[in-house]
Amino acid sequence: MKALTLPLLAGLAAAGVTPATAQDLSIGLKSEATSMDPQFHQLSTNIQVAKNIFEALTTQDALQKVTPGLAESWEATDDTTWRFKLREGVKFHDGTDFTARDVIYSFCRVPLVENSPSAFTIFTGGIADMTAEDDHTLTITTKATNPLLPTELWSLAIVSAESLGAEDEITYGPEGTCEGMGDVPQAPAFNSPDIAVGTGPYKLESYTRGSEVILTRFDDYWDGTPEWERVVLRPITSDGPRVAALLAGDVDMIESPPIQDIPRVEEAGFTVVDALSNRVIYLHMQQVEEVPGISGTDGENPLLDAKVREAISLSVNREAIAERIMGGYAQPAGELLPPPMFGTSGRPVDPYDPERAKELLAEAGYPDGFSITLGTPNDRYINDEQVAQAIAQMLARIGIDTRVDASTASQFFSRRNALEFPIYMAGWGASSGDMSSPLKSLVATYDAATGMGPTNAGRYSNPEMDALLIEAMSTIDDAKRDQMLQEAETMVLDDYGIIPLHYEQTVWAMKPDLSYEPRVDQYTMATEVKPADQ
Amino acid sequence: MTETTANAPVRIDSPTRRIAKEFIEDPVALIGLILFVLVALIAIAAPWIAPQNPYDLAQLSIMDGALPPGETSFGTDMTYWLGTDQQGRDMLSAIMYGLRISLMVATVSLGLAISIGTIVGVVAAYFGGKLDSFIMRIVDLQLSFPAILIALILLALLGRGVDKVILALVIVQWAYYARTVRSSAMIERRKDYIDAARCLALSDRRIMFRHMLPNCIPPLIVVATVQIAQAIALEATLSFLGVGVPITEPSLGLLIANGYDYLLSGSYWISIFPGIALVVTIIAINLVGDRLRDVLNPRLQK
Amino acid sequence: MIVYLIRRLGQSLLAVVAMAVLVFIGVYFIGNPVDVLINPEATQADILATTQRLGLDKPLYQQFGIFIMNALQGDLGTSFVYGRPALDIILERLPATMELALVALVLSVGIGIPLGVWAGLRPHSIAGRTIMGGSVLGFSLPNFWQGMLLILVFAVLLGWLPAGGRGETTEFLGFQVSFLTLDGLSHLILPAINLALFKMSLIIRLARANTREVCLQDYIKFARAKGLSGRRIVLVHVLKNIMIPVVTIIGLELGSMVAFAIVTETVFAWPGMGKLLIDSINLLDRPVIVAYLMLTVLIIVSINLLVDIIYSLLDPRIRLSEMKG
């Protein structure tokens, strides 16, 4: 690694940057993994840490395109049957071979994990059966047609059946009815490197809660020798100290430096990379007759009128928010997923037109506007509270007197789900990188029985769109599905059922001798940090 | 005739004048007092003297966001002497309004806490016995727990809000006054004039609040000055931790907390100026309190 | 004395239980932790299943009954977030907080008493006035703001010390501590100063006031008249006489330092249990919040008791039964 030559800016801590031991890498993360068990908590922090140790049948590249992982190839033999050819010569950290038995064991374990606050069963629930034709050929049968199976498999980490004490013969059964599982170790056991055995490029060396996760290179990794001898992942949850840790040379790289600090980090000679994320920030509006938090309308809900919703969209100066509040690290959004991701149509961003917005309000019968409460979390998305305040400012300009009601995520989500806000701001990251994800969760008609619209706390409902979406979700043909999703999205946006604001951009900052290919899914993965001069 | 002796103007006035005279002998304390009066005036007059109403959203423009001190607005010709925050809010105005909320929260909670504490303290001292020991057990128990812990938990449960912060501050403060008042009232109770008042068959209430209470005031004032400074600091800390006042009514503490995110990036004014306002306020009160304690403490009179 | 101790313990236990009940019920009403914890893609059925798994679908009185039954067996519940016993998670963080609090305490006493005594002996000298002025400042700067300034100056502008985190730890008497390594020590300095400054100012004021009072006592005047050296008078008489109030304050303040560590740990990202409390409040991790409170209250109560006992040892004239608080 070349010696560092940093511009010594007046009194800046960059002076403290010392070349790390060439083979070591330390990363400051913005949150802490709650467990080393890759099947315990479906949380991005846990997943990104686990991805260093464990792998899955498929992987997703930086743009969320599905590529082969522990499965070399796969095909859908009919609407519900998939055949996977597993990679040969893959070893676990304990030296045993990876076979189909490990895959079945791993999928079987998911429903058996106790106390999970967000279980991975949402991916295994649809699997009817699994059979191993031989050690490296696996057939998976799904209950319903699921074109997204290969995408979803990325989330299911493969653990070692041997290390976890499985019997020799494992038979798959849905919802935790597998046989031959032995005594299944629970999440806390994964703090031990003897249990946290995967096939990934790094082995777990130690896990000190609140402090650090130490990983060491797995020399027998199937896909070449990993870059770093030792990787230290340190959760530094406060923004300021995380940046300071980078500036002071305590860590080599950090994720999500607060955007207001980026110019300073760049000035100090660090490399900053960013990428558009799959997360859209949106406004959702109550579509029921009786809503709390609105006054000046004689008890009517003005948001039921599409003209009012359009006026709200036109009143928002998305460029100004992206530039002034987000420091340029956001992109005005016209859709629910940034193009060219799957199912996007390239629809233009709504213009900023306060005059037209006022006209629309008048046409809808509210020439003097009304008063409304805008709900927002204040610790969830990048500068969320600031964005909400800016929106309140802009709505005030067209006569909608807006009060911002900001609360911590814990209270916000409970209150939102209880439909306490007439209009609220939130974000959606499509982990599958596919339009069906936001459509299904945010705008499909809320129906607990079918699992549609779980996050549709505006209770928007468009039966025509619902029908098209359901059809798309069971269409295996990608081109056809893409077309249907585009149509469905256009229906919702034409009706202003939801108002996209901006796509967040994810930022990483690192020492100048490192490079990182920014990921759409916002994950920070040690495996993809490379020395800059290669 | 005991009543007139206790309340006679000569006996009240002359110590007050003596205290005032002694107080201003210390120039540092005088500066503290002047600063405090100034701060209080600014807080009271904020809506009339602030250059901008920082909470009228229609007056703000994010195009003026994060301007350094001394810059002029893009839209109007207004000059932001202390800069603006991300929303384009004039920091000078925000600080004036923030002071207002900080002082309001502190004084209202102080008033309520003193009232409750005084009543409880006098009652405990006057009646003595089981009631006294029961009340004082509660007081002692509460005082043995750090105020910040109790307030933090209360607010985490209650949620944000000015009224809730006041409630939490009252709950953590009343015990200090109860203890202070009780201990001075205990001394008073043993004095002859109380017995005399009892002989005159005056009502308990009258004896407690007309006769005993006025004599408990000096130590109460000392505790109150210390506590009001603590209350302001505590409210700021709670707001910093995210459980204090809501964003729509920011106190100095919340302004500092908001600016904290921008401190490293060089936009120091968003956090530093409200911080200075807060520290000046607290120091001024503490200087006054220090001097008051010296003046009111008979043991250091020698 | 035994009767006294038992009564004190009884009262404190009552306080612990009352607090736990209040908080348990309070957190129940804030919101459903599943709303925060679950992956947003989860369907309504997944949410319901998770709620059931965490036992949150039961009515409040049932949840509370289960909690009490388990608590009586020493089990304070399983963290919703970590899926492990809440008490374990807190105990893991306890050493970091205790180390921070103890170092801060040593700093505040070690610096506060000498400065206070000095200022008390020479109240009108420049040094004496400077010390008092400094203590008013230390007393007035809100903890969090002072921490921010420390970071800004020493970590960001000067780059001498790290801005946060705990650094390297080594094992000492079975605990992970950071004061034995250079790296650990460098991480410890700023948070410890931050936590110590307020208490140091308190101790300076206390030591000064007591020194002044002691100096006015007849026996000091007598000692001076006898021709004892100034240093001896200070060391023997003054220090001996200010010990009692100082021990009280140390005892009471150690408890409050554990609580105030919440602020310091938040500012400096110190991985102690105060930081854990804030995180748990944000995630509505009720078992951890309740267990934290019970443990902290227990620590404070034990320290108070210990102080009382030391008190009676230092000054046999004080009988424990007469003391309160």
Image: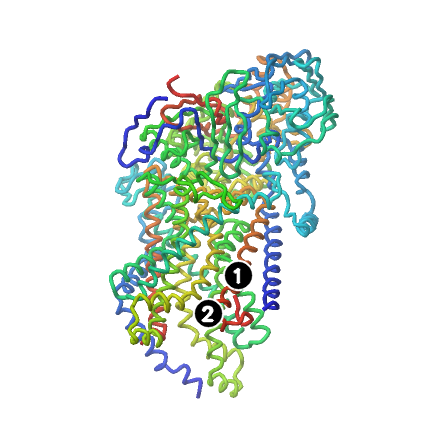
State whether residue B51 is above or below residue A259: below
Q: Is residue A136 left or right of residue A46?
A: right
Instruction: Please rate how many residues cluster around mark 1, counting C-alpha atoms within 10 Å: few if below 14, some from 14 to 19, many from 20.
Output: few
Marks 2/1: CA distance? 25 Å
Task: State the SS at label 2.
Answer: helix
Q: Is residue B193 left or right of residue A81?
A: left
Q: Which residue is mark 2?
A: B180
In this view, the residue in front, A138 or A25, is A25
State whether residue C117 is above or below residue C195: below
Instruction: Name the quarter where the C terminus of chain B is drawn.
Output: bottom left
Q: Which residue is mark 1?
A: C306
Residue at mark 1: chain: C
Instruction: Please rate how many residues cluster around mark 2, counting C-alpha atoms within 10 Å: few if below 14, some from 14 to 19, many from 20.
Output: many
In this view, the residue in front, C320 or B251, is C320
Q: Which quadrant holds residue B216?
A: bottom left
* Residue B96 position in % (x across, y down): 34, 51
* Residue A259 position in % (x across, y down): 39, 33
